[in-house]
Amino acid sequence: MYDEQGARRDRRAILKNGLVLAGALAVPSAVSATQRLTARDLKPMTQPPLPRSPAMPISSSRVVRPELLRQAMAALGRNGSRIPHHDRIAIADFTASSSQPRFHFVDLASGRSTSLLVSHGSGSDPAHTGYLERFSNAFGSNASSEGAFVTDDYYVGKHGRSQRLIGLDRTNNNALGRAIVVHSAWYANKDMIASHGMLGRSQGCFAVGEKDLDQVFARLGQGRMIFAAKV
């Protein structure tokens, strides 16, 4: 249920920290997706606890570029009524190579961030260069989609432990039907960079390293925004 009092506290914290974030965040140096998940694939699970380790400070070199942050904040405001929790957001910077920690988890109340690796879709990078070339919202494209997503429930399905996403823009509103989710994969592990210079590709999902999944689930939770863009 939407916590209106909590949301007001979140908004106050965001306003307090907005200028700090804008100034401090600097430029940093598969199963077919056309198949809709069925009830048999969806085995509910609970959210892991938030990691106790301290988050990465915003002074880190691996943080969100200012223009991307501005777009993410605009998306949060535009979709505010459809996103229950405004305390934390995730931003996928698909301008960066898949070899870079480009999945940024920003705590809007404290102004701290954590950055992790994330894969993009094979349809977005057909030559497998490590860089996203295009987005698509089309069924069967195997591509990543741009725009704002809201995180939904956790389940165990074809990719193991996963979290469903609901696309909030016309550029990603097929996300649920395309089974675009957050899950872990061996091809998104850090050792892929040492051996191949880049991560492998998903079928449009936000695939993260197997050891990072609990942290990603905990930081996202349900009812928070993921914003994906190439700026």
Image (spheres, rainbow, N blue to C red):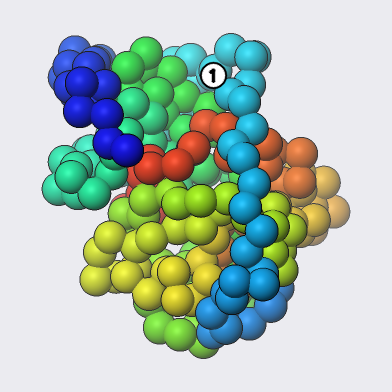
Left or right: 117 in relation to 178: right
Residue found 43% across the figure and 18% down from its top = 112
Task: Determine whether 21 is above or below 110 in the image.
Answer: below
Left or right: 73 in relation to 40: left
Q: Residue 80 lies in what quarter of the image?
A: top left
The residue under label 1 is 56
The amino acid marked with disc number 1 is: Met
Q: Nearer the viewer, residue 65 or 169?
A: 169
Q: Residue 157 lies in what quarter of the image?
A: bottom right
Q: What x and y, as percent, mark residue 59? A: 44, 16
Q: What x and y, as percent, mark residue 43? A: 66, 58
Residue found 62% across the figure and 40% down from its top = 46
User: Which image quarter is the N terminus in?
Assistant: top left
Q: Can residue 48 be seen in the rendering of this structure?
A: yes
Q: What x and y, as percent, mark residue 88? A: 38, 30
Residue found 58% across the figure and 12% down from its top = 54
Q: Dot 1 lies on which element? A: loop
Crowding at mark 1 (Cα within 10 Å: few <14, some 14-19, many 20+): some
Q: Residue 16 lies in what quarter of the image?
A: top left
Q: Nearer the viewer, residue 168 or 54?
A: 168
Left or right: 222 in relation to 32: left
Task: Determine whether 43 is above or below 111 in the image.
Answer: below
